[in-house]
Image: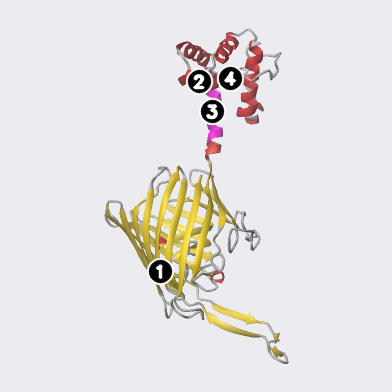
Amino acid sequence: MKKKVIASLAAAMVLGVAGTSFAAANPFSDVPVKHWSYGAVTQLVNNGILEGYGDHSFRGDQPISRYEMAIIVAKAMSKLDQADANNKAIIDKLSLEYAAELTKLDVKYDRLEKKVDSLKWSGFVRAKYDSDSSNGVNNGGGNKHYFLALEGSGKVNDNWTGHWASETRHEYTTSGWGGVNPPDNNAGDGTWFRIWADGKIGDVGVTGGRKWFGFTDNVVWGHEATGLWLDLPTGQLKTTAFVAKPTQGNGAMTLKDATNTSIYGVNFNGDISKNVNINLLVGGNKKNNLVTTTAGHWDISQNPSVWVPASSTTTTQQMSSWGGLTVTTKIAQDFKLTTTYARTNANDFNTSQHVRLDYKGYDANVPGSYGIYARYFKFGANGDPSHDDEWDSLRTDSKGWILGVDYALGKNIQWSTFYSDQKLNTSGTTGATKDLSRKLIRTSVDLHF
């Protein structure tokens, strides 16, 4: 019976925990049937230090190997804090008997642990709802959805790491909670659409691939691109040079036809005093000619119908150089002020501004922690190449203010809500109503992991 209990315990550990990577190569000899360690382990099982596994047996009529016995001893050693003096003495005696095997197992476990540790996962699940309207009329916002963001990384060696990211979004509905309209067919969702690697070549940090990135509080640039980023060794001032091709949607929030151009620039980031940080971005883009072609067609709005020949118009991108400066200042205990000014070389409406005041701050590890913030923004029609629109809450050619709060409902559980009063089409250049009023209320719950 003793041997059967021990064999069952070994089998469960070997097959269920250790896995085939250990079982495939067993370097240890068998433990003699009458060896004292069988009785010692059985006593630990009877005393509740180790668990038995019912009537299931593993080679029940044969002795187990020293390898399998060492795994049992390792399990017992992990329960030392639960053992009394008598059981501790038994465990100590077993650990001395199987010291050599335990050392070899440690090496195997270390190798396995390193492989496991080289892979890391993070992300969050979100449920979000917007009320987005003007005078009771929907403003076109459709951010009523649940969302999964998943990012993984794998350590290649001491210098290089690979990354991959996926996002999946499905809408409750575009106009209410009932039904789904349009269907859950968000193109590209659930694919590993961002893939990049980072590492070092000498003293230079290198990142290459397709990823989301942002500079100057994401006011000048906060979007996705495929490119190369170099972190240059410039002392306490972090310097990043980049060249990239925009890839998300049209490629940019403001820059026209951005997927058919390339962007480049240099970002400087560093503390200039104990309480002040600056982030300066200087960049530009290749200024392509944009050709819009209209195919020949019958104009049936006229009677009789009239044939309209094919035509094309040529325009140019509205900017070719841009930059911005963000200054973050700790102005008092629990208060932080962040201001950003951006400018392009477009002919008109070529500036963007953003101001944010934070009080305290949400901490995912501290349930009950919270942060309150107030923001003012003014994004010119040509004021930046691609600010982060934060799920359509910060549109190009708009201005307004936001008052919001982030609260930790529990560890890694974040509740966020804000109210925003805005004016859309502030330039009056799109044909829509100038300074159209927008009232936006957003609330969401994120489960981080």
Task: Determine the residue located farthest toward the bottom in the rendered image.
Answer: 304
Tell which circle, 2 or 4, labels the residue nearer the N-terminal end. Answer: 4
Residue name at image x 48 percent, y 80 percent: 429
Residue linked to disc 2: 77
Q: Are marks 4 and 1 in contact (CB under 8 Å)?
A: no
User: Is 140 on the left or on the right of 279, as rendered?
Assistant: right
Give the number of the disc on residue 51: 4
- The reply, left or right, for residue 274 in relation to residue 298 is left
Disc 2 vs disc 1: which is toward the camera?
Answer: 1
Of labels 4 and 1, earlier in sequence is 4
Residue 38 visible? The answer is yes
Residue 107 numbered tag: 3
Residue type at numbered disc 4: Glu
Distance between mark 3 and mark 4 Cα atoms: 25 Å
Inspect the image, locate mark 3, and give the three-letter code of the amino acid beneath it.
Val
Q: CA distance from mark 4 to mark 1?
A: 64 Å
Instruction: Give the Cα separation between the discs numbered 3 and 2.
Output: 17 Å
Q: Nearer the viewer, residue 163 or 298?
A: 298
Residue where numbered disc 1 is placed: 400
Instruction: Give whichever of discs 1 and 3 has the lower sequence position.
Output: 3
Q: Secondary structure at mark 1?
A: strand
User: Which structural element holds mark 2?
Assistant: helix
Looking at the rendered structure, the kind of residue marked 1 is: Gly
Amino acid identity at mark 2: Met
Residue 293: image quadrant is bottom right
User: Which contiguous range is marked in magenta?
Assistant: 102-113
Residue beneath the point at 64% across and 24% down: 12
Q: Position of residue 79 (x, y in %)?
A: 50, 21
